[in-house]
Image (cartoon, grey):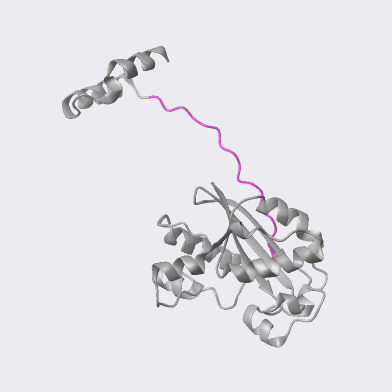
Amino acid sequence: MRQILLDTETTGLEPMNGDRVIEVAAIELVNLIPTGRFLHRLIDPERDIPPEATRIHGFTRAMLEGKPRFPEILAELEDFLGEAPIIAHNAGFDFAFLDAELMRCGRPALARGRMIDTLELAKKRFPGLPNSLDALCRRFGIDNSMRTSHNALLDVRLLAEVYLELMGGRQPGLGLVAGIAAAETLVVAETARPRTPRLIAPSETEVAAHTDFVARKIKEALWLSPPFAAAAAAE
């Protein structure tokens, strides 16, 4: 099961009034496990960034001049997203901004059936409690001390840990937020190096010990019944 965690930063709150995406970050999960693949891009919004927005995420117009424009990163973004479900915190916000950018490029909007909103998941699990990303990090004991401002890559890494907690599957020491470099220097990661499967075969002693254990502890073991035994012998 492939899923994508996603976060964006923007010039403001209203995509239909001309606010634009300035940063997009995404992390790949397969069977709820981060694969190590991620996408991160800073984007020239082709407009000013109001001071109130800069106070939230720290980006100024000057910092983004010369970065790729959204149409230039569209192909790799669509390739990375594929057809996978997209997980975001307050997902309607990110979807609305991406839809506006896609519309400018003549592309269809993202299917809402792909949306998984961790804010809604948290509200159902913790009704009446604060469910911001920071609040959830505190509740789950996730270190967010480096989150002094909004940053899409850091936020999506934190969101990965929060989502795994919400799904009951976070692994201790996952460490998704460790070692993050300056956001504007990060690029698309290569797929993790494939590993060659290694056959592990039990020794004769181990097989004998297992057979003895089954005989003593499990009565009428199903896999020792004639149909299963015959199938195993045939293999």
x and y percent of residue 9 in the render?
Answer: 66, 72
* Observer able to see residue 42: no
- The C terminus: image quadrant: top left
Please state the extent of the stretch shown in magenta in the rendering: 184-201
Q: Please tell me whether residue 59 is drawn above or below residue 208 in the rendered image.
A: below
| Front position in the image: 138 or 223 | 223
x and y percent of residue 153 in the render?
Answer: 61, 65
Which residue reaches farthest bottom?
51
Which residue lies at the image location 77% right of the left edge and 79% below the top edge? 61
Which residue lies at the image location 43% right of the left edge and 61% below the top edge? 166
| Front position in the image: 222 or 180 | 222
| Front position in the image: 200 or 117 | 117
x and y percent of residue 174 in the render?
Answer: 46, 56
Left-right relation of 116 to 207: right
Which residue lies at the image location 63% right of the left edge and 81% below the top edge? 56
Number of callouts: 0
The question of residue 234 being in magenta is answered with: no
Quarter of image, res 62: bottom right
Left-right relation of 43 to 91: right
x and y percent of residue 63 in the render?
Answer: 76, 76
Which residue reaches farthest left?
216
**What is the magenta segment's predominant secondary structure?**
loop
Quarter of image, res 49: bottom right
Q: Please tell me whether residue 116 is drawn above or below residue 17 in the rendered image.
A: above
| Front position in the image: 178 or 135 | 135
Q: Please tell me whether residue 201 is drawn above or below residue 191 in the rendered image.
A: above
The question of residue 191 being in magenta is answered with: yes
Which residue lies at the image location 67% right of the left edge and 82% below the top edge? 53
